[in-house]
Amino acid sequence: MSRPLKKISSKKRVFKEPLQAPKGVHDVVFPETVYFSKLEKICEELGEFFGYQKIEVPVIENKLLFEHGVGIDTDIVEKETYSFQTKGGDWLSLRPEFTSGIIRSYIQNGMDSWPQPVKLWTWGPLFRYENPQAGRYRQFWQADFEFLGSENPVTDAEVILLATKIVKAFGIKSSFIEINSIGCPECRGNYRKALKAYYRSKTRKLCPDCRSRLKKNVLRLLDCKNEGCLTLKKEAPEIMNYLCKDCSSHFRKVIEYLDGLNIAYVLNPFLVRGLDYYNRTVFELKPGMPETGQDTPSLLGGGRFDYLAKLLSGPETPACGFAIGVERMVEMISNKNFKPEVDVYLCQIGDTARGKLLGMLEEFRKARLKIGFDLGRDSLKAQLTSADRLKAPFALILGQEEVLREKIIFRDMKTGVQESLNLENLAEQIKKRLAKL
């Protein structure tokens, strides 16, 4: 019999209302945790198949890393990065993205001396001060893949292929790539002049942010989601007309590889991505078909960043990669095609049965059966309710009488039909029934 909980001392402060998580952050709870784990496992397995090694980079980095890497005039650094000064006077930032940190680690750990190319992937939370909305949080999760050390256009296609494989393996049946080339610094220099000339006479029609961007970084105007700015963008110059011979050839080969792989794609001449380190190929993956999904949010995005390592005082390292928005991926299939989290749920009635089941757990573990149980519960009805919640196909019910007879009641949770099974080799009996589902 359980003892009553002690009352909170009257001297301790009691909040009038329960404390809530800060605005813009969220708990990952069941069943979302199942999908998070599934996606991470897919990333690990496909990443390993494609030759990627797992890396862990710090949650906090030097503030200058993102200012120099991502770009001081980008919205991410200018408006969204959480930065703070330590007691020792250092300026640090919570990581708003992974790529800069991975390149910093590549340089710091001398990975340029490793056999090339170096393929790295990671998984974890990132932080940006954004307006919370569906699929967009201030603490959010990403999976990130970086292919370092190759400038060949086949690398771009391989990276995109991996992205599509992960999305398909996760259960999203149809998707397509939006793709563009933003060229090299020389290409973009000419393109920036053309963009400035186009927008200069339309300054009054721009939103306040874009008026500032026109002076600082005109490419960022193409990222703006303001309706008025979107309308103006339709008639803006397209960067394809400003690509140099090498960049044009590189992009043409990427497209040829995608055609050969039968990967659905759409050319988006205004796709630039919101980070300054990108060059040449940039892409995003969206769910659905090209003719219907172009207005839907992207599930992942990436591109080339051949100059980032050198920008961060490292060796010249051509590179390409992408990042997956975990929450958005999970929202796509959440509560759809949910598979049982447990193979069988163990129910008990009475102390004798509790002790017996406790001793049987190892048998189920060795048989690699996923089981559910709550030995602290007395009510059989409550235990069967838990079995339903976990979508267990079967339940096993053990009472004092069954213990004495070396038997257990097997219940089909779908039909409600029950039968008596021997306790000997019980796990193998359950596995045979699972194989028939």
Image (cartoon, rainbow, N blue to C red):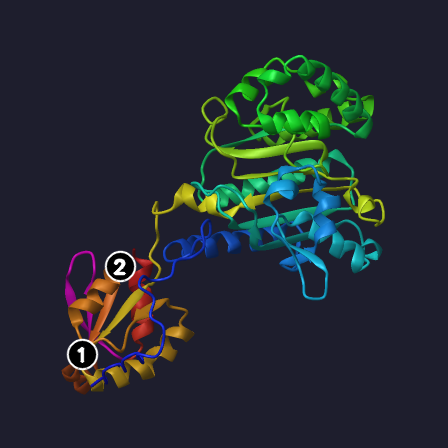
Residue at horizontal 82%, vertical 21%? 245
Q: Visible in this render: residue 259?
A: no
Residue at horizontal 46%, vertical 54%? 36
Name the spot of residue 311 as percent of width and height, x first: 81, 44
Label of residue 349 in the image? 1
Name the spot of residue 206 as percent of width and height, x first: 59, 20
Question: Looking at the image, which is closer to me, 80 or 332?
Answer: 80
CA distance for labels 1 and 2: 20 Å
Name the residue carrying label 2: 389
Task: Estimate how packed mark 2 is, as few (under 14), some (14 to 19) or many (20 or more) residues with alpha carbons within 10 Å.
Answer: few
Question: Looking at the image, which is closer to me, 323 or 396?
Answer: 323
Left or right, 122 with reference to 419? right
Q: Are marks 1 and 2 in contact (CB under 8 Å)?
A: no
Left or right, 111 with reference to 123? right
Q: Is residue 51 above or below residue 274?
A: below
Q: Visible in this render: residue 416?
A: yes
Task: Estimate how packed mark 1 is, as few (under 14), some (14 to 19) or many (20 or more) residues with alpha carbons within 10 Å.
Answer: some
Residue at horizontal 66%, vertical 28%? 212
Most common secondary structure along the magenta stretch = strand
Whether residue 416 is in magenta: the answer is yes
- Amino acid on which disc 1 is placed: Ile
Q: In this view, does 35 lie above or below 17?
A: above
**What range of the chain is rendered magenta?**
408-423
Residue at horizontal 58%, vertical 41%? 163
Q: Earlier in the sequence, mark 1 or mark 2?
A: 1
Whether residue 3 is in magenta: the answer is no
Name the spot of residue 40 as percent of width and height, x first: 52, 54
- Total marks in image: 2
Q: Is residue 172 above or below residue 179?
A: below
- Amino acid on which disc 2 is placed: Arg
